[in-house]
Amino acid sequence: MSVSGPWLYAWCDETNRVDALAAALSALVIPGGTCGFHIESIDHPDSTWRWRDTVTLSETVAAVRAGFTAGTHVFASFGVKLNSGSAIELAVECNGEEWERRYPSGPLCARPGDRSDLLPWSLRIALGGTRSVEVEAAILAMQVQQDLEDLMVRLCAPDARARVAAGAWTEFADWGPPAKACATYHTNAALVAHDLALTWVNLRDGDKVAHSAGMPTDVLHARVDAAPRGARVAVEDGAELSREAVLKALTESPAALLDALEASAVADEEWRTAESAALETIAATKEGAPTCEVDVTSRKHVQFIERHAPYHVRRLPSGGVVLATHPYRTLWPLWADALFLLGITS
């Protein structure tokens, strides 16, 4: 039985949506590869589900440009090569504004054909060297994080054009609160505090992040400020986020906030110990050493990743930023530590 997820969501203005999809497909589709796609429209229900298979990239983009309206839903499926080297099937959806209002799922959304495509159950690693659950889990975590971050950048920032404003990888078929995502993207690193504001309006007011992700800072600030003083929302594991913490984060110097996030992303001792041996094993595998297949689904593997997988704060050449960790974790601990460093009580 196929299990979907994780899901990658992205927000962009409707005027940029087709261009954003075209740029993402160009960055994702294996060179020379083909797409299968259909275009559905609530404006013209009689012409829905026009499925076309093995279509070139240029033909796919041309068909989308010709048929895209506010009521359009585009579904495309194609092969993509991961940063780790394997090829998988990826599905990307693009929705017009009217479709999005009726079926909110995000202007752009991508997902693998099966969960195991991005979160493998086993790995082939070099024989010999240091072998332990921790080392195997570290190898898996590094591979998964690199693949997810690479796919996020290729969908959200495939070139220097800032079409996509924000994005997130989540474990659920819904663009939930960014603080509970495993990765987020902002085309402007100075707006990284939007993650907390969007988390607030989602958890307190029930706003769909797929709709609110494009809100400007002043609107988000006003939404948070409208809550009563001392108001709080539960984030995870008993942790809460206060109205005052979100307001302070929104007015904090972006440079100071990013510095605090980077300082909070320092890996712990357990990870650093496993990482050293993991990197040696990865290098030996790439150099052609004999390998064996190892199962990485045990509870011990999962627990190590849940507790120790590192956080990454990537400042992109385009001026954007990616916050990321493994899907077994969320970004909330990173945010909580960064707020603490800034003297902001969450």
Image: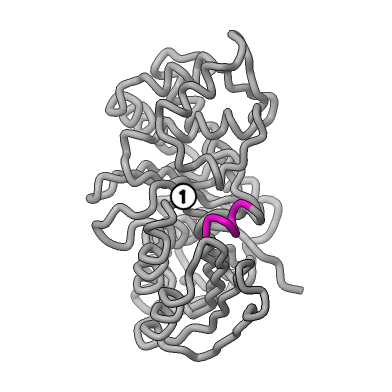
How many C-alpha atoms fall within 10 Å of the one at disc 1: few (<14), some, or many (≥20)? many
Residue 333 appears in view: yes
Give SS at disc 1: strand
* Percent x, y of residue 233: 65, 23
98 falls in the magenta region: yes
Q: Which residue corresponds to mark 1?
A: 167
Name the residue at 51% across, 45% down: 309
Residue most extreme to the top: 229
What secondary structure predominates along the stretch shown in magenta?
A: helix
220 sits left or right of 120 in the view: left
Determine the image quadrant of residue 116: bottom right
Residue 285 appears in view: no
Name the residue at 53% across, 52% down: 169
48 sits left or right of 181 in the view: right
> Between residues 202 and 272, which one lies in front from this camera angle?
202
301 falls in the magenta region: no
Determine the image quadrant of residue 321: top left
* Percent x, y of residue 316: 28, 49
> Between residues 45 and 162, which one lies in front from this camera angle?
45
* Percent x, y of residue 68: 48, 70
> Between residues 134 and 261, which one lies in front from this camera angle?
261
- Magenta residue span: 96-101
Name the residue at 60% across, 16% down: 227
Name the residue at 32% across, 39% down: 189
Determine the image quadrant of residue 160: bottom left
**Which quarter of the figure is the N terminus placed in?**
bottom right
* Percent x, y of residue 255: 27, 28
